[in-house]
Image: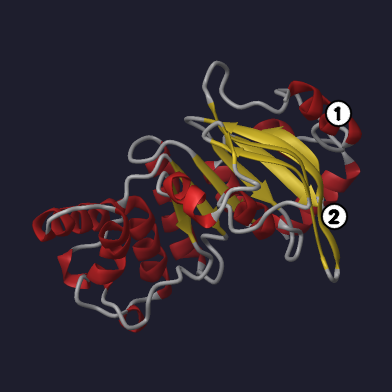
Amino acid sequence: MPNTKRAIEERHGFPGALRTPGGVGGHVGAPHVVEVIGAEKAFAAGPVLQGVTFDISKGETLVVMGGSGSGKTVLLRHIAGLLQPDAGQVRVFGQNIEHLTEEELLPIRRRMGYVFQGAALFDSLTTYENVAYPLREHRHLSEDEIHERVARFLGVVALGDEVMPKLPSELSGGMRKRVGIARALSAEPEILLFDEPTAGLDPTNSKMVGDLIRELHGGVCDTAIVVTHDLELTKTVADRVAILIEGRFAALGPLAEVLESREPTVQAFLAGEAR
């Protein structure tokens, strides 16, 4: 629907208040994994997204920065099909998902891994059962195959077999985050969605999680969207950065160019985050 797409882009000042060099697209020649075109969303308290447009290509990590309540998580939930936009389009793996049923969304979600802000582990399940959960739900594997995958992906996040019988309450905050990442990886997704992956962590664990996301980028899953207010995490993992302010992108472009932006709104945001 090229005419519709063009109209939405023109209406909302494609892609946002500031167009940094490098444009909207990701890696040149790489297929788009996610495209969001003119997405709008409002709740009772008022508008949250006001014409957000961007795409992400296979093989890149896009970081969406913004303060608390800026709409970062709302945007991520649109991509996962957990929310539908009031207007605009959300396209994942080339398919528009904004009007799909839960049943129709299932095969698309199987190709994603979602890392929740608080890890969202099942309190009553062991680490092993938490990581195995998506495999039991969405894959037809033997118990030996499940055990092999659980052990492999716990190893990817630098956790050993000794954590398998532990409940989430017996793990540190950093370990729970890593178990959440291992669970998201266990189904071998094509894209990972991270919701505030360093929230609530001390600097040491924050650095560990950031380093892990960067390492995943070059190996297990090479495409990711990370929403965060953490500037240090952004510097560690981002290929491109989008800054979400008052429901719109104030900046969108390669990491270095956004960090060097002279746009006053962007400078003020980055200075606040740095402090």
Mark in the foreground, 1 or 2 = 1
Kindly give the residue lying farthest to the top in the view shown.
29
From the top left corner, tell me how far across and down residue 37 is, in percent: 73, 36
Query: Can residue 229 be seen here?
Result: no
Residue at horizontal 67 percent and vertical 33 percent from the top: 256
Query: Can residue 130 be seen here?
Result: yes
Residue topped by disc 2: 246
Mark 2 Cα-neighbour bin, 10 Å: few <14, some 14–19, many ≥20: some
Q: Which coloring applies here? A: secondary structure
Residue at horizontal 29 percent and vertical 78 percent from the top: 125
Question: Could you say whether the residue bearing mark 1 is in a helix, strand or loop?
Answer: helix
Q: Amino acid at mark 1?
A: Ala
Which residue occupies the foreground of this view, 172 or 109? 109
**Is the residue 9 above or below the residue 194 in the image?**
above
Q: Is residue 235 left or right of residue 253?
A: left
From the top left corner, tell me how far across and down residue 156 is, in percent: 28, 51
What is the quadrant of the N terminus in the image?
A: top right
Which residue occupies the foreground of this view, 88 or 130? 88
**Is the residue 121 above or below the residue 213 in the image?**
below
